[in-house]
Image: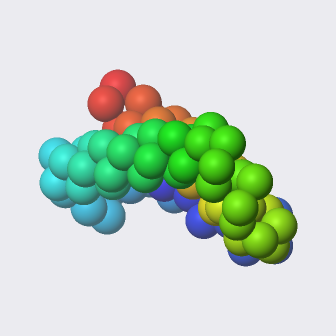
Amino acid sequence: TSYTPSGVEVLLPVSELVDVKDEVKRLSEEKSNLEQYISSVTAKLSNENFVKRAPEAIVKAEKEKLQLAKEKLEKITIQLKHLEK
């Protein structure tokens, strides 16, 4: 797994620290939740009425949340690939 303080990524041998099956299950659930969240926010931002009527700061915040969720999903996907080897 990795931890990213201040842009530095540290890799640890997870198989020696945690039950890999439990970690895969946890990450899979988190991945599923993120995919649903990303779908929801994407739908909201695709709605012209929302984008037109919501304050600019709210639209910007939703776009930032979407980007962060996508980045987190990418990291979880990578972690799962490493664990499932």
In this rendering, would 28 be left or right of 65?
Answer: left
User: Residue at image x 70%, y 66%?
Assistant: 54
- In the image, residue 53 sits, relative to residue 21, either above or below, namely below
Q: How many marks?
A: 0
Q: Where is residue 38 in the image (x, y as percent from the top left)?
A: 50, 46
Residue 72 appears in the figure: no
Viewer-proximal residue among 35 and 80: 35
As rendered, which of 83 and 30 lies closer to the eye?
A: 30
Where is residue 14, by image quadrant? bottom left
Residue 41, given in percent of the width and then of the height, sits at 53, 50
Residue displayed at 64% across by 49% down: 49
- Left/right of residue 16 with respect to residue 78 in the rendered view: left
Residue 31, horizontal then vertical, whole percent: 37, 45
Who's the residue at 79% across and 63% down the image? 60
In this view of the protein, which residue sits in the foreground, 69 or 83?
Answer: 69
> Quarter of the image containing the C terminus?
top left
Which colouring convention does the figure follow? rainbow
Query: Can you say whether 80 is above or below 68 in the image?
Result: above
Q: Which of 48 and 68 is in front in this view?
A: 48
Give the image location of residue 40, x and y in percent.
45, 47
Q: Is residue 37 visible?
A: yes
Residue at 42% x, 30% y is: 81
Q: In this view, does 60 lie above or below 5?
A: above
